[in-house]
Image: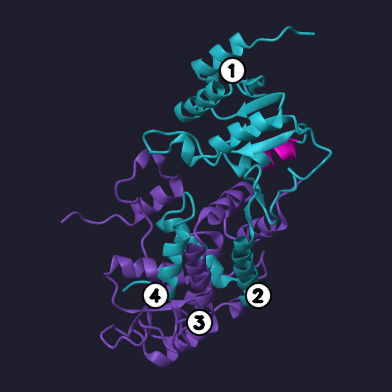
Chain colours: A purple, B cyan
Amino acid sequence: MKYPEILSNLIEDLKMLPGVGEKTAERYAFSLLEKTKEDRESFITSVKNLDKLRKCSICNYITEDEICSICSDKSRNNKILCVVEDAKTVLLFEKMGTFKGQYHVLNGLISPIDNIRPEDLNIPTLIKRVIDGGHTEVILAIKSTIEGETTSSYIKRLLKDSNVLVTRIANGIPIGAEIDYIDSMTLEMAFENRNELV
Amino acid sequence: MKYPEILSNLIEDLKMLPGVGEKTAERYAFSLLEKTKEDRESFITSVKNLDKLRKCSICNYITEDEICSICSDKSRNNKILCVVEDAKTVLLFEKMGTFKGQYHVLNGLISPIDNIRPEDLNIPTLIKRVIDGGHTEVILAIKSTIEGETTSSYIKRLLKDSNVLVTRIANGIPIGAEIDYIDSMTLEMAFENRNELV
């Protein structure tokens, strides 16, 4: 005895979502089953609409058009470029709202173990963009994992001969966090990057 | 600056899944965006197919036909009925595999607070089924919450005058669980229901 095939197919499909295993997929499937036909149709339409999205031909952020809303925004500073791992981070920064430059989405990080090379990412387009664009600053907003560090130093190296200032966002203690719970690497960085109180 | 509308619509729809908030919905939406068009189509088809499922006219379990595979299985004992809250529990018991009787799915529990009355559930159909069916035993496999207890005693009361034996599945300590971590109500039940070692 197993699920009706319709349900087990849906459960299999739901398991492609990140972090969703058998139990959660079952729960979602039953929940979708309990919804009205209209709710499910709205859901289906939303998923179908994803086909309309593509990557901005300049920065790789998601867009419905050739060029995304950020790249085509003339009011933004096009001399400062923030390099991020994925489109989600762009959104996070935009929610923060203080950065008014432009972005470049790498679509991943260099990882020899997973066989992800710089050419598999949007690194060549980044270098070309910076060299052609006369940017004054490239901010690397990439996490401090082995892959992140590798990617950061690789980009730094390729931009060495250009005049652009390459910076990275600060490591340190999150606001409000208990210092006792912070790992020693982060503490070390926090000491190193200490600021004068003004 | 916000998500492209296509993405924010999908995020809203994903939030109708149980336990899915903004963050998880965002994660799922981006994951769906990264999938191939084919994967998404398979997913859409699976959701759409849910429209084909309905409730068994005898027991309310999910089925593609008028009567579900369990009710139409002649090899099962149709004199023993197991009463459960929802279709998911049926599946759990079927995975266990030892119960060979039939089921009755209530589709919820009595809850005056949420204004769920016996008539809103499949309780009247249960009573009629048992009285007409000449069942020998009705096993209540309902959780021990206030709503569960209310529902169990309500059913017990309605079946008082019939000849059927009404039982409930045992409360006790889960196999492998640390006794220190079990609540006192469960411990009390476990003592009360103790068995002779044989």
Mark number displayed over residue B38: 2
Q: Are marks 4 and 2 on the same chain?
A: yes
* Residue at the extreme bottom: A132
- Kindly identify which chain the residue marked by label 1 belongs to: B
Bin the neighbour count of mark 2 within 10 Å (Cα to Cα): few under 14, some 14-19, many 20 and up: few
Q: Position of residue A50 (x, y in %)?
A: 51, 76
- Kindly identify which chain the residue marked by label 2 belongs to: B
Q: Residue at x 45, y 63 (%)?
A: B13
At label 3, which amino acid type do we have? Answer: Lys
Q: Earlier in the sequence, mark 1 or mark 4?
A: 4
Q: How many callouts does the rendering have? A: 4
Residue designated by label 3: A52
Residue B77: in magenta span: no
Q: Residue at x 45, y 26 (%)?
A: B146
Closer-to-camera residue (A139/A18): A18
Closer-to-camera residue (B55/A40): B55
Bin the neighbour count of mark 3 within 10 Å (Cα to Cα): few under 14, some 14-19, many 20 and up: few
At label 4, which amino acid type do we have? Answer: Glu
Residue designated by label 1: B179
Residue designated by label 4: B5
**Is A174 left, or right, of A28 in this rendering?**
left
Q: Residue at x 70, y 10 (%)?
A: B195
